[in-house]
Amino acid sequence: MAAVAPMIDVDGLIRVYRKGPVDTPVLNGVSFRVRRGEFVVIMGRSGSGKSTLLNILGLLDRADGGRYLLDGADFSQADDDARSAARNEKLGFVFQQFHLLERASALRNVTLPLLYAEHDAGDETARAERALESVGLARRARHLPSELSGGEQQRVAIARALINDPAVILADEPTGNLDERSGGEILEIFRSLVDAGRTLVLVTHDRAIADRADRLLVLEEGRIAGEETVGSRGPGLRTGAKGPM
């Protein structure tokens, strides 16, 4: 039986920021794989390249070298149209800042990605209502962000990320603006999404969050310096670049 291809496969990613005559290396040959339906956390100190790496995985930025395969398709040299289509079809994004429109209801905020994706006309409201129900906010659909708590606003952001039924969720410090209780509730939602078959890659500096994942990747000086199986799959730190298939 043939091995199942990983959802994410990066090999030797390099990213250098250039400002005038000064080159600042950020990623120095990052390589790893993420299985389908896996919850992977990337940790590292400030400036280690975590957000840059996540932006490349999200097709929001381009690497200067190396290879990136998403769901088996090579996006290393893909044009802007192909990258945009993949973002709309395969990826959902959740950030530390909620990025909600203040004058739009939770329901309206959730429908916004549908403006950029092909879908059946007239089903926006039903899809948004289902997405909000999946994060426990069905009764708050008509509320403005100012009428919601921080945890509820992040739930709206997660529902927005789910509206196009993406295979992969990318999250950058999603609990950074939340108290411990609300942050724990957000992590429970993420775990339920993974248990339902979605792939999740989450960037954080919080070890307690990493302990909720399946696997931890440690980023140091632009490289994967270590890998650890965590959560219910048991502990075990090891060095190495490529994750298991």
Image (cartoon, rainbow, N blue to C red):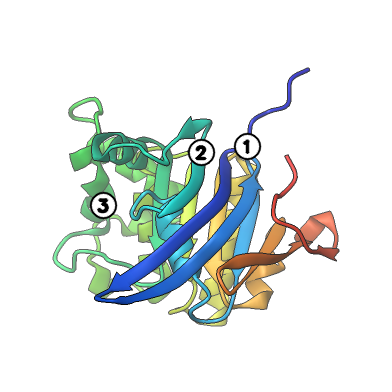
Q: Earlier in the sequence, mark 1 or mark 3?
A: 1
Q: Quadrant of the C terminus?
A: top right
Say if mark 1 contacts mark 2, CB within 8 Å.
yes
Q: Percent position (x, y) of residue 205?
A: 57, 77
Q: Percent position (x, y) of residue 100?
A: 25, 64
Q: Secondary structure at mark 2?
A: strand
Amino acid carrying mark 1 in the image? Pro
> Which residue in the structure is indicated by mark 2?
69
**Residue 67 visible to an observer of this rendering:** yes
Q: Percent position (x, y) of residue 78?
A: 34, 37
Q: Percent position (x, y) of residue 71?
A: 52, 34
> Which residue in the structure is indicated by mark 1?
6
Say if mark 1 contacts mark 3, CB within 8 Å.
no
Real-space CA distance between mark 2 and mark 3, rounded to the nearest whole angstrom = 33 Å
Real-space CA distance between mark 1 and mark 3, rounded to the nearest whole angstrom = 34 Å
Q: Earlier in the sequence, mark 1 or mark 2?
A: 1
143, above or below 198, in the image? below
Amino acid carrying mark 3 in the image? Leu
Q: Earlier in the sequence, mark 2 or mark 3?
A: 2
Residue 91 quadrant: top left
Callout 3 environment at 10 Å: few (<14), some (14 to 19), or many (20+)?
A: many
